[in-house]
Amino acid sequence: MSFRIIVSTIGVLGLLYGSAHASPCTAGCGQQKRDCVQAARVAKKACKDNCRLSTDHVARRDCFKACNDSNKSAKTTCQANHSACIAACQGGSPSGALTD
């Protein structure tokens, strides 16, 4: 029984230690990326809804493809911004070079 308590205590202390040392800057980068990806999803849905309302069934496929392409581009931008944010948090530039 005491072994379980010791192991549990060590586990809790490890979690507390890890979360205390998590950088608020990098956590903000993660939230920024999640928000960016969510905005891209909403924009994709709006684009597809617009395709449904404003195009005939023949042109709809091309319209949907344009929505998907736009979404992929937006997600790529989200990832690039996330990488730049992490680099800035770590004192570097987006290219990975450290700055003074």
Image (tube, rainbow, N blue to C red):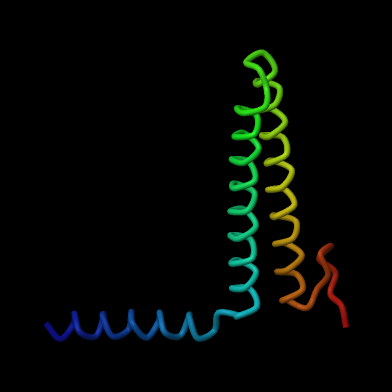
Query: Compared with residue 44, is residue 32 higher up or lower down, i.e. above or below?
Result: below
Q: Residue furthest top?
A: 58
Q: Residue furthest front?
A: 54
- Total labels drawn: 0
Instruction: Judge by depth and name the residue closer to the eye, 68 or 63.
Output: 63
Q: Residue at x 67, y 27 (%)?
A: 54
Instruction: Judge by depth and name the residue closer to the eye, 3 or 94.
Output: 94
Q: Residue furthest right?
A: 100
Which quadrant would the C terminus be assigned to in this image? bottom right
Query: Compared with residue 62, is residue 68 higher up or lower down, i.e. above or below?
Result: below
Residue 55 appears left or right of 14: right
Tell me which corner region of the image, top left, top right, bottom left or bottom right, holds residue 73.
top right
Q: Residue at x 50, y 86 (%)?
A: 20
Q: Residue at x 83, y 69 (%)?
A: 93
Q: Pinpoint residue 72: horizontal percent, then vertical percent.
A: 69, 40
Q: Pinpoint residue 37: horizontal percent, then vertical percent.
A: 62, 53
Q: Pinpoint residue 77: horizontal percent, then vertical percent.
A: 75, 52
Which quadrant would the N terminus be assigned to in this image? bottom left
Tell me which corner region of the image, top left, top right, bottom left or bottom right, holds residue 99.
bottom right
Residue 92 appears left or right of 55: right
Q: Residue at x 84, y 62 (%)?
A: 95
Query: Compared with residue 80, is residue 65 higher up or lower down, i.e. above or below?
Result: above
